[in-house]
Amino acid sequence: MDGRTDTDATASSCPLTEPETIRSFARVAIPVPLGQAFSYTVPPELGAGVRRGARVLCEFGRRRVLGVVLDVSTDAPDIPAEKLKPVRAVVDPEPVLPDELLSFLQELARYYIAPIGAVIELALPAVERTAAEALARQESFDAGHSTGRMLQNVSAMPGVLATEKLKGNALAVLDDLRTNGPRSLTDLAKQWSTARAIVKKLEALELVKLERVEARPDPFFAQVARDTPPELTEPQARAVNRLTVALESRAKCAFLLDGVTASGKTEVYLRAVQRALELERGAIVLVPEIALTPQLVTRFRARLGDRIAVLHSGLTDAQRHAMWRALRRGELRVAVGARSALLAPVHDLGLICVDEEHDGSFKQEEGVRYHARDMALLRAHRAGAVCVLGSATPSLSSIALARSGRLDVLKLPARARAAAVLPKVEIVDLRQVGPGPGGDRLLSLTLFRALEATLARGEQAILFLNRRGFSPSLICGSCGELLKCPNCSVSLTLHRSAGESLQCHYCDYSVAVPKTCAKCHAARLTEEGSGTERIEATLKQALPTARVARLDRDVAAGAKSEAVLDRVRAGEVDILVGTQMVTKGHDLPNVTLVGVLNADSALSMPDFRASERTFQLLVQVAGRAGRGDTPGRVLIQTRQPEHPAIAYAVLHDVPGFIERELRDREEVRFPPFTRLALVRFDALDEGQALAECERVAAIARGAAPSGVEVLGPTAAPLARLRNRYRFRFVLRAVERKPLRDALLAVARASVSRLVRVAIDVDPVNML
Ligand code: ADP
Ligand code: ZN
C-alpha cells in the first residue's frame, strides 16, 4: 500500500519526473481452466500497447501463453512485487475483442462461475488461437497476418465514362462491372477466358480498380436469388412495428415472439434485421441447429444478400476466421448461427433474435456451460440492443420472464398463409390398437391406414421416433440378461444398416453381435423394441411401392441431412422416418401426415422438464404437417393419452399446458419458481467420486446462506459414463445471490485430482 501512495503522490505533484517509477499492472485472461485472471507488470517499452482487449504474450508457469488483457491499472495487485512477471509482448495493434463483447464475456464468466480465459477462448476462432500459439513459440509476430484465401476483386471506377478506346470483350467486361457491381477476377475469367489481360488493360486506363480481398468461401455462400418480401399479416405488422420503435429509440427491450408454427416468425426476424441494418447497426440471429436449417439461411440470404456471416460447423477454421475478421472489421454486420454465434464480434449490436428459443441445444453441455438464450438477453441488455426470443412453444423460463414484465409479448396467433391451417391431431392408444400388416407395434393399424391414404393421394408423411439404430436393446430370451455397454450404464443398441453391430450411444464402444448370451450361453438373443432403422425396413416390406428415406445421425451428419431433405422437397421421398432431426423447423408443404410413433419415450426421462420437452416436441413435430394448401393430420401414438403433455398437444393448447405445468412446478419448487445449480462429480473409482461429492456437499451446506437448499448427493441417473462413476448434488434457491455465494464456496473447495467436478448453473440436462 505504501508504494501505491508514493506513486500517487509523485504522479500528482510533479507529473514530469521519472514516469518509469509509475508502474502499471495488467490483469490478463489466460486460456487455462482455472482462476479468473492473472496479474503481470507492464514494462514501460510496451506502454500503451497493453490495453484492454489486446492480446499479449505472457509466461505461465514454464510455458509462454497468449492472453487477453482485461484491464490495466496502477494499483498493485495483492501479490508480492517480485513474484509478478512482465508482459512479454503485445500481439495485435488493435484490441482483438471489442469492448462491448469483452465486458459481456466477463459477465458470462461471472454468471456461470467459469474461468474467464476459457470463456474468451470460446469467442476467438481457432485460427486466431493457433496463429497465436505459433507466435508464442516464435516470439515474433506479423501484425498484418491473414489466414483467409485472398481474391482479386475488380470494380469499375466511379464516374469515368471514357470508353471510346474500348471494343469487344473489354467493353463487355466493363459494362458487366458497371451494371452488376464488383466481381472477383476468377469469376470474370470463368465468363471471359481473356479476363486477366482485359482487366490489366482496363486498370491501366483507370477504368477499373483491382483490390485484394479476403475470400469467404462457404457452402452457404452460394448465390441466392433475391426474394420479394410478402405483405405482412396484421399480427406480423404489429410485431414488426413494436420492434422498429424499440430499435429506433435504442431502447433496451426484450420480446417474446409467441407465434404458432408457420405463423411467419422468420419474416418478423427478417424485417427487424433489415431495420437494424438501415440504422447502421448489427444483428445476431441464433438458430438451434444450423445444419438442419439451411432453408432459414437461404431466406436470410435472399433478403439481405451477402451482408451476413453464416457461422456453421461445416466451415473450415480458415473460413470461420475470415467471417470472424469480416465481422470484427464491420464489413459484415449480421451473424447467423447456432449458440456460439452469440459470441460473434458484431459491431454496434442493435438486435439479437433467438429462433426456437425453447430448444435445448442453446445450452452448451461441456466446458463453459452457458445458455445462449439466457445470455442473449444479457448481451442485448448490456449493448443497448433489442432482443427477440421466438417460439411456438415458449419455454417456461421465458413465460416466467414475460409474466414478470421482463419480456414484452408479441403474438402471432395463426398461420401466415391463409390456406395453411393447424393440423388435426389424433391419439392412437397403443393399449387398444394393434399392429398393422408390418407386425411392428409402433406401426399401428391406424397409422398404417393413414399412410396408405396419404400415399394414394400422392402426399408425403413424416414419422418421428426418438431412437436411432435397429433395435434399442438385445435381451437373452433364456435368462433375461440385457446386453449393456461395459463403460456406461446403458444398454447397447443393435445397428444393421452399416454392418451389424452393437453400439453404445454414449461412448464409442462397438462390438460384433454375439451368438450366445455371455451369462447363460443360450443362443436366444432377441431384439427388443424398434429404432428408426427397423421402422424403415418394416415400411419397405409392408408398403413396397413407397419410397422411404431415413434421417438420423447415422445417415446424415451435417450437409448430408440437407441432401435427404432436398429429396423430400423434390418429391422423391414418400415417407421420411427419423429422430428429432425431422422435428426441426422444416417447411415441407407437401407433408400432410405426421406420425409420432412413441410419445411416451420422452416422458419417461428422469428429468423435471420431461413433460415440457415432450409437449414442445409434439407441437413442433405436429407443426410440420399441413404447412401448404392441404390440411394436415397428426397421429400421436401413446399408452398414456391422459398425460397433460399429450392431452394439451392434441388440443394445440399451448397456454393450457403452460398453466398446468407451471402449477406442477410451483408445487415441487422447481424452475422457473426457483433457481438450480447442479454440481457433478465423476471418477474412475466409484468410492472416490462419492466421497468427494459428499465432502463438497457438506462444504456447500456449511457455506449456504439461508434460503439455499442442498439436495443430495445422489448417483446421477446415468450412473456410469465412459467408465467414470457419476454423482451429483443440486443447489436450489429462489434468489440468485445466495445461490451464487454457496456456489463460490463449492468452486473454491479443493478436490482430489482424480475426481472431475463440473458446476452447471441453470442446468438443462439433468442426466
Ligand atoms: P415460422 O418461422 O413461424 O415457423 P415461417 O416464417 O417459416 O414461419 O412462415 C411459414 C410460411 O409462411 C413460409 O412459407 C413463409 O414464406 C410464409 N409466410 C410468412 N409470412 C407471410 C406473409 N406475410 N404472407 C404470406 N406468406 C407468408
Ligand atoms: Zn458406453
Image (tube, rainbow, N blue to C red):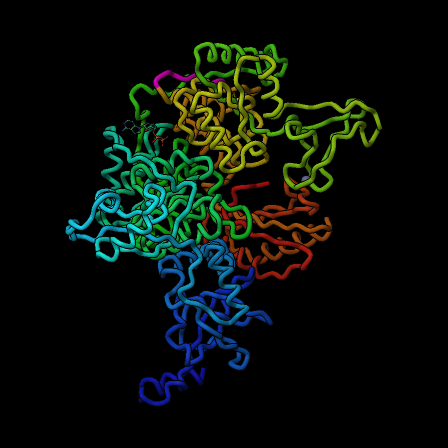
Residue 284 seen in the figure: yes
Question: Magenta part of the protein: which range?
Answer: 629-635
The residue located at (58%, 52%) in the rendering is 758
In the image, residue 545 sits, relative to residue 290, either above or below, namely: above
Q: How many marks?
A: 0
Looking at the picture, tell me which residue is in the foreground, 152 or 462. Answer: 152
* Residue 542 spot, x, y in % from top left: 59, 12
Q: Quadrant of the N terminus?
A: bottom left
Regarding residue 387, the answer to whether it shows in the image is no
Above or below, comparing residue 332 to residue 52 in the picture:
above
Please state which of residues 469 and 306 is positioned toward the viewer in this rendering: 306
320 on left or right of 410: right
- Judging depth in this view, the residue of 17 and 678 nearest the camera is 17
Residue 405: give x, y in percent of width and height: 32, 42
> Is 396 covered by the magenta stretch?
no
Q: Residue 631 in magenta?
A: yes
Q: Quadrant of ligand 2?
A: top right
Judged left or right of residue 61, residue 734 is left
Question: Does 396 appear above or below 531?
Answer: below
Residue 629 in the image: state x and y as whole percent: 34, 18
At 39% across and 56% down in the image, what residue appears? Answer: 104
Q: Residue at x 72, y 48 (%)?
A: 686
Quadrant containing the C terminus in the rendered view: top right
Question: What percent of the width, then of the height, locates residue 170?
Answer: 25, 47
Does 372 appear above or below 658? below
Q: Quadrant of residue 482?
A: top right
